[in-house]
Image: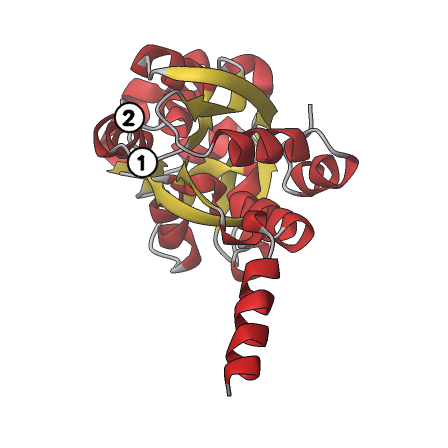
Amino acid sequence: MKKISTLLLLILLAVPAAAQAKIVIASGAGYRSLVDKLTATYTAQSGNEVERVYGNMARVTAQARNSGSVDLVLGDKSFLEKADLDCCATQKVGRGRLVIAYPKGKSFNGSDDLLSKDVSRIALPDTKRAIYGKAAQQYLKNKKIFASLEPKLLMVATVPQSASYVVAGEVDYAFINLTHARKIKDSIGGFVIVDETTYSPISIIVEQMSNSEHTAECTAFMDFLKSEEARKIVAAHGMQD
């Protein structure tokens, strides 16, 4: 029995420390499919576990600032710069793109479609707290149709919430990001990528919190994001540079 116990102890001690490491990454909810795929691939390669937290960016940054448990934050560069988190490293992930999604049985051929009398509701994320809500508002103002459409706009908190309305067929159109649009493409009629000159560029980055106790693991994950495999995942989610 003693020999068996000793053998078991040796096996446990032989498990690499990296396999027991866990970092926490907080991300905007609209990037869930991307972050899930990136972290799953990273864990499979390294053995390092990654806990994921999702929400609107205001909540994400508040949690990162106040909880002391968040190691990495993924989101829009402009929002994170304004949040002014105490970070020690930054890694670019890709470029975000705004799309207009529509339910099955409908189509989208240009901004004039939004003005149709048959259109009653258009979903979009929060124009103050969500980067794609801000981008949608910029697009509508650039097209000089925001004031006309404002009564039809249904503002929600996040990209997934905006998408849920178009999936359910409860809105005529929804502004979401390309990453999430690709995720739900089989559940909707389709989507159109919005002209990127009609809204401010959206750069998605990862920031490492200065108070993280997992410096080595954070560095390993940031290095993974530079790898060819990670870049392929990012491109597959519509966020290539």
Residue found 53% across the figure and 15% down from its top: 201
For marks 2 and 1 on the same chain, the one whose residue lies earlier in the sequence: 1
Residue found 27% across the figure and 32% down from its top: 68
Mark 2: secondary structure: loop
What x and y, as percent, mark residue 151? 22, 31
Q: Nearer the viewer, residue 153 or 218?
A: 218
Question: In the shown orientation, is residue 37 left or right of residue 5?
Answer: right
As drawn, the label of residue 56 is 1
Residue 219 appears anywhere in the view: yes
Q: Are marks 2 and 1 in contact (CB under 8 Å)?
A: yes
Which picture quadrant has residue 238? top right
Residue 118 appears anywhere in the view: no
The amino acid pointed to by label 2 is Arg
Between the C-alphas of marks 2 and 1, the distance is 7 Å
Mark 1: secondary structure: loop
Q: Mark 2 points at which residue?
A: 129
Residue 105 position (above or below residue 51): below
Query: For the residue carrying disc 2, how many other residues have a C-alpha within 10 Å: few (<14), some (14-19), or many (20+)?
Result: some
Residue found 24% across the figure and 28% down from its top: 62
What x and y, as percent, mark residue 24? 41, 41
